[in-house]
Image (cartoon, helix red, strand yellow):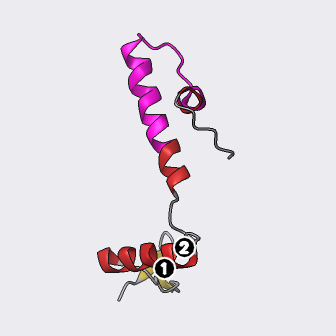
């Protein structure tokens, strides 16, 4: 079982409560994915496809910026150029 304790300088370790994690490890992730497909909505706390697109756009913007000598490249512009219009 997971445990967490905080220790203030010069003080004793103070155990902290932890919320149970319903979808731990790979089996839990696959179960959450299956439930999202069956229910038609993502499990709370799990990233969505839109979240992942924004992450990829951020990385692509950084790589493109570096390739262009530091020129500003906005992730939203890359998404729009790909025909992806998401609302955050």
- Number of residues whose C-alpha sits closer than 10 Å to that of mark 1, classed few (under 14), some (14–19) or many (20 or more): some
Looking at this view, is 49 or 25 the one in front?
A: 49
* Residue found 38% across the figure and 25% down from its top: 63
How many angstroms separate mark 1 from mark 2 (CA)? 8 Å
Q: How far across and how far down the image is residue 58, in percent? A: 48, 35
The vertical placement of 4 against 77, above or below, is: below
Q: How many marks?
A: 2
Magenta stretch bounds: 55-78
Name the element at disc 1: helix
* Residue found 54% across the figure and 73% down from its top: 43
- Number of residues whose C-alpha sits closer than 10 Å to that of mark 2, classed few (under 14), some (14–19) or many (20 or more): some
Asked whether, in this view, residue 40 is left or right of residue 7, the answer is right
Residue at mark 2: 43
Q: How far across and how far down the image is residue 57, in percent? A: 48, 36
Residue that lies at the very extreme toward the right in this rendered image: 87
The vertical placement of 74 against 22, above or below, is: above
* Residue found 54% across the figure and 17% down from its top: 72
The image quadrant of residue 86 is: top right
Residue at mark 1: 35
* Residue found 39% across the figure and 18% down from its top: 66
**In which quadrant is the N terminus drawn?**
bottom left
User: Looking at the image, is mark 1 or mark 2 nearer the viewer?
Assistant: 1
Question: Residue 80 magenta-drawn?
Answer: no
| Lower position in the chain sequence, tag 1 or tag 2 | 1
The vertical placement of 6 against 76, above or below, is: below
The vertical placement of 86 against 23, above or below, is: above
Residue contact at pointers 1 and 2, CB within 8 angstroms: yes
Name the element at disc 2: loop
């Amino acid at each position: 079982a997971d445990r967490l304790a905080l220790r203030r300088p010069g003080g004793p370790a103070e155990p902290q409560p932890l919320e149970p994690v319903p979808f731990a490890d790979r089996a839990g992730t696959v179960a959450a994915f299956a439930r999202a497909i069956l229910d038609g909505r993502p499990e709370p706390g799990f990233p969505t496809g839109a979240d992942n697109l924004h992450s990829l756009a951020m990385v692509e913007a950084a790589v493109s910026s570096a390739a262009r000598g530091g020129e500003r490249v906005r992730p939203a512009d890359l998404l729009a150029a790909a025909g992806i219009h998401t609302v955050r």
